[in-house]
Image: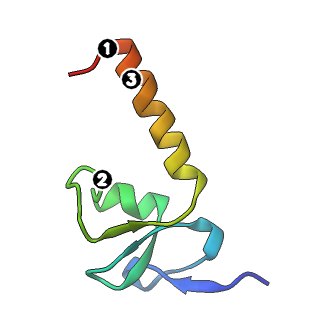
C-alpha cells in the first residue's frame, strides 16, 4: 500500500499525488493545492519540487508558449 503523506490543510495524499513540499508550512502539496495557493505565481522560494510528471508537462507548455509568442 502507498505511503500517506500529510498535505496542506491537514489532508492526506499518496506519494504519487504530491508534486512539491513547502518548507515554510512543512507539508507536502498536491497539484491542485499548488495552483490554489498560487505558489507558482508568487514564485515562492519555500516550494521544493518533487519528481513528478506535473513539472515536465509544465515546462513543455512554457516552451510551446515561448515558441508561439516569441521570447520576451
List x then y, in percent, for residue 15: 62, 75
List x then y, in percent, for residue 52: 58, 58
Q: Is residue 72 left or right of residue 15?
A: left
- Helix, strand or loop for disc 2: loop
Mark 3 surroundings within 10 Å by alpha-carbon count, few (fewer than 14), some (14 through 19), many (20 or more): few
Between the C-alphas of marks 2 and 3, the distance is 17 Å
Residue furthest front in the image: 71
List x then y, in percent, for residue 1: 79, 84
72 or 40, which lies in front?
Answer: 72
Mark 1 surroundings within 10 Å by alpha-carbon count, few (fewer than 14), some (14 through 19), many (20 or more): few
Picture residue at 24% right of the left edge, 49% below the top: 41
Picture residue at 46% right of the left edge, 39% below the top: 59
- Helix, strand or loop for disc 1: helix
Q: Are marks 1 and 3 in contact (CB under 8 Å)?
A: yes
In the displayed structure, 42 sits above or below 24; it is above
Q: Is residue 28 left or right of residue 14?
A: left
Between the C-alphas of marks 1 and 3, the distance is 6 Å
Picture residue at 38% right of the left edge, 23% below the top: 65
- Mark number, residue 40: 2
Q: Are marks 1 and 2 in contact (CB under 8 Å)?
A: no
Picture residue at 73% right of the left edge, 81% below the top: 2
Q: Quadrant of the C terminus?
A: top left
Q: How is the image coloured?
A: rainbow
Q: Which residue is mark 1?
A: 69
Mark 2 surroundings within 10 Å by alpha-carbon count, few (fewer than 14), some (14 through 19), many (20 or more): few
First in sequence: mark 2 or mark 3? Answer: 2
Looking at the rendered structure, the number of numbered marks drawn on it comes to: 3
- Mark number, residue 38: none
Between the C-alphas of marks 1 and 2, the distance is 21 Å
- Mark number, residue 65: 3
Q: Quadrant of residue 51?
A: bottom right
Amino acid at each position: 500500500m502507498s505511503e500517506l503523506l500529510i498535505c496542506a490543510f491537514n489532508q492526506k495524499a499518496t506519494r504519487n499525488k504530491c508534486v512539491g513540499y513547502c518548507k515554510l508550512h512543512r507539508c507536502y502539496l498536491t497539484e491542485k493545492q499548488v495552483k490554489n495557493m498560487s505558489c507558482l505565481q508568487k514564485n515562492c522560494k519555500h516550494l521544493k519540487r518533487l519528481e513528478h510528471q506535473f513539472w515536465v508537462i509544465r515546462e513543455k507548455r512554457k516552451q510551446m508558449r515561448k515558441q508561439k509568442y516569441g521570447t520576451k
